[in-house]
Every structure is written in structure tokens, then in C-alpha cells.
Image (tube, helix red, strand yellow):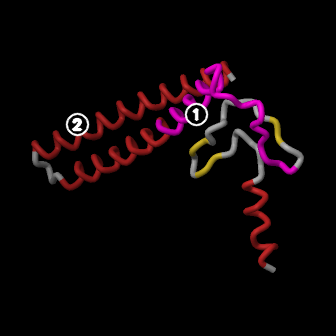
Amino acid sequence: MLENILLPIKNFAAVCDPNQTFFGLPVWYKYIKVTPNPDGSCNFNSFTFWPPDNLLLVLLAILDMLLIIGGLVAVIFVIIGGVQYITSQGEPENTKHARGTIINALVGLVITIVAASLVNWLGYRLG
């Protein structure tokens, strides 16, 4: 009985898919060409940190993760700025502060989207 419940978890962990995500974050080997073992797990026998080809691809995947987190933080700040704007009750100083928060968060969101696109393009180009 317990084996039937844990079977999907076991199969998910054994899948060698560089496109899989965990809560929207890519795996660290996203841009590395890996070959799956017969059991479905990844074969990292040819993986080396030197020459720095693979190291650069791992760093790009980590940077991709950080940019996704930065985009989520920017969206949270847009929401916070919206709540501040609604609760400012027309007071000019509070409204100005809330508008600044929203504008800064949107600029940060655009920067993270452009940077994530460039990292993604570069990762697949080098990988």
C-alpha cells in the first residue's frame, strides 16, 4: 500500500529532465547536456568543473533561479505599492510614496524579465 503511494514521488525524483522545475525554479543542470541512465536518473560521469564550460552553464542556471526570485519579489512590491496607494486615502505624501514603490517595482520587473531572457538565450546557445 505504501509503495503505491510513494511510487509517483520515486519516479519524479528519478527523472532526468533538464526542463523540469521545482516551484517554478529550474534545475541546476538546465543547460548541460546530460544523458539519462537506464533507471531514468541523470548520468553526470562526463561532468567536470574544469575546463569551465560546465561551470559557466551551472552558474547561468543559478543566475536564472535568482532572476526568477527577483521577479517574484518585484511582483510582491507591486502588490505592496498597490495596497499603499489604496490605503493612502488621498494624502499627497503617501500617494507619492506608493506611486514610487509601484514604478520602481515595475522597472525592476522589466529588468529581471530582460535579464532572464538574455540568460536563457545565452545558456541554450552555449549548452
Q: Where in the figure is residue 64, as x and y percent of width and height? A: 53, 34
Q: Where in the figure is residue 93, as x and y percent of width and height? A: 10, 43
Mark toward the viewer: 2 or 1: 1
Q: Classify mark 2: helix, strand or loop.
A: helix
- The residue depicted at 75 percent of the width and 42 percent of the height is 17
Which of the 4 image quadrants contains residue 42?
A: top right
- The residue depicted at 72 percent of the width and 55 percent of the height is 13
- Near-viewer residue (72 or 126): 126
The verdict on residue 56 being magenta is yes
Q: Amino acid at mark 1?
A: Ala
Which of the 4 image quadrants contains residue 53?
A: top right
- 56 vs 10: above or below: above
- The residue depicted at 30 percent of the width and 50 percent of the height is 80
Q: CA distance from mark 2 to mark 1?
A: 32 Å
In the image: residue 82, left or right of residue 120: left
- 35 vs 8: above or below: above
Q: Which residues are magenta?
A: 39-66
Residue that label 1 marks: 61
- Near-viewer residue (11 or 78): 11
Q: Classify mark 1: helix, strand or loop.
A: helix
Residue that label 2 marks: 100
Which of the 4 image quadrants contains residue 95?
A: top left
Q: Residues within 10 Å of mark 1 (few under 14, many from 20)?
A: many
Q: Amino acid at mark 2?
A: Gly
Q: Where in the figure is residue 122, as x and y percent of width and height? A: 60, 21
Compare marks 2 and 1 and give the one earlier in the sequence. 1
Q: Total marks drawn?
A: 2
Q: Residue furthest right?
A: 38
- The residue depicted at 79 percent of the width and 66 percent of the height is 7
